[in-house]
Amino acid sequence: MEKNRSKVGGKDKKQKRKEELAKKKTLDDLLKVAYAKENILAEFPAFLKYERNGLNLTIEYGTGESLSSSMKDYIMKLCTVNMEGPFGDEWPQEQKNKRREMVSQAARYIILRQTNGSQVNAENEAQALESKSTEQKQQSLWTGEGDPVVAFVQFRFMIDHDVPVLYVYELQLESCVQRKGLGKFLMQFCELIGRKNQMKGVMLTVQKKNVGAMNFYTSKLRYSISAVSPSKWDPMIGSDASYEILCKTFDAEAKAILEDGRPES
């Protein structure tokens, strides 16, 4: 009898292992398909311009391996301007981490440039927008060729707790394009990209000191503090952590794992 139980137990373990390997292969294949695309943004032609609230922006695609020297310099300058304060004493080490992340083979970019011109009818409105465009160009940290870059998103496709997600590593906007709906547009664009590539949610990390960003994600965009965030999985340790992990999920299984902290039954 004991032998039979042992055999049954062994079969169950083998079957479970087989199912786990099959699931892992399915998830790995999902990422491979997403990363194999030459230009992930090509599937969204209607999203490659942002012409609202006095802004006239064009959107480009990039990868960590294809960044020019000018783009690398710009990314680090903008990250420093926006993030040195929230990170505080942790910034020198975090800056090193960001330099490595920036050029990763897995890094994917949405890059926004400020262009000339505006589609308005009244001459005085056109002049006002042209003046504003000139002012924005002067404020931009961009020193490379072409129209000035004024914002970027860095994201990756990854598996988190067996859930395929689009993880936003960076959402950085210059001050001259903030508070114009651009951040919300870019996050909604990331959600759309995630859904198109069969991801089950979007995740990101926010510094607790960055109160404005935390309110933006949780109040305006309805993101939740993830069950995998330090404050949720171990409140004692999490209270000392300087960050929270936020998420928005697209189906019940992903919600159960990433938001509720329980496997789907």
Image (tube, rainbow, N blue to C red):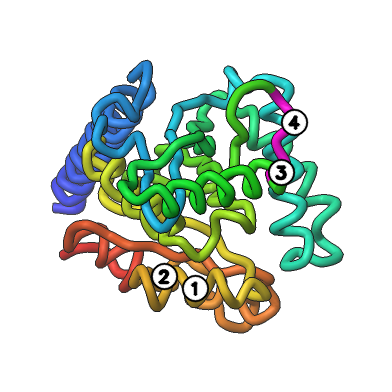
Q: Residue at x 24, y 36 (%)?
A: 46
Label 2 belongs to which residue? 227
Residue 189 or residue 107, whichever sits in front: 189
Where disc 4 sits, the SS reads loop
Location of residue 155 with respect to 85 vertically, above or below = above
Location of residue 145 with respect to 184 vertically, above or below = above
Q: Which residues are magenta?
A: 140-144
Give amino acid for label 2. Ala
Give amino acid for label 1. Trp
Counting residues from the start of the chain, the first of labels 3 and 1 encountered is: 3
Q: Give the CA distance from mark 3 to mark 1.
A: 46 Å
Where disc 3 sits, the SS reads helix
Q: Is residue 64 left or right of residue 35?
A: right
> Residue 184: percent from the left, percent from the top?
39, 59
Q: Residues within 10 Å of mark 2 (few under 14, many from 20)?
A: many
> Residue 222: percent from the left, percent from the top?
33, 72
Give amino acid for label 4. Thr
Label 3 belongs to which residue? 138
Label 1 belongs to which residue? 233
Front label number (3 vs 2): 3
Marks 2 and 1 in Cβ contact (< 8 Å): yes
> Residue 58: percent from the left, percent from the top?
43, 34
Q: Residue at x 28, y 33 (%)?
A: 21
Q: Give the CA distance from mark 4 to mark 2.
A: 41 Å
Determine if residue 14 is in view: no
Q: Is residue 74 left or right of residue 52?
A: right
Label 4 belongs to which residue? 143
Location of residue 30 with respect to 121 vertically, above or below = above
Location of residue 141 with respect to 214 vertically, above or below = above
Counting residues from the start of the chain, the first of labels 2 and 1 encountered is: 2
Counting residues from the start of the chain, the first of labels 4 and 1 encountered is: 4
Marks 4 and 2 in Cβ contact (< 8 Å): no
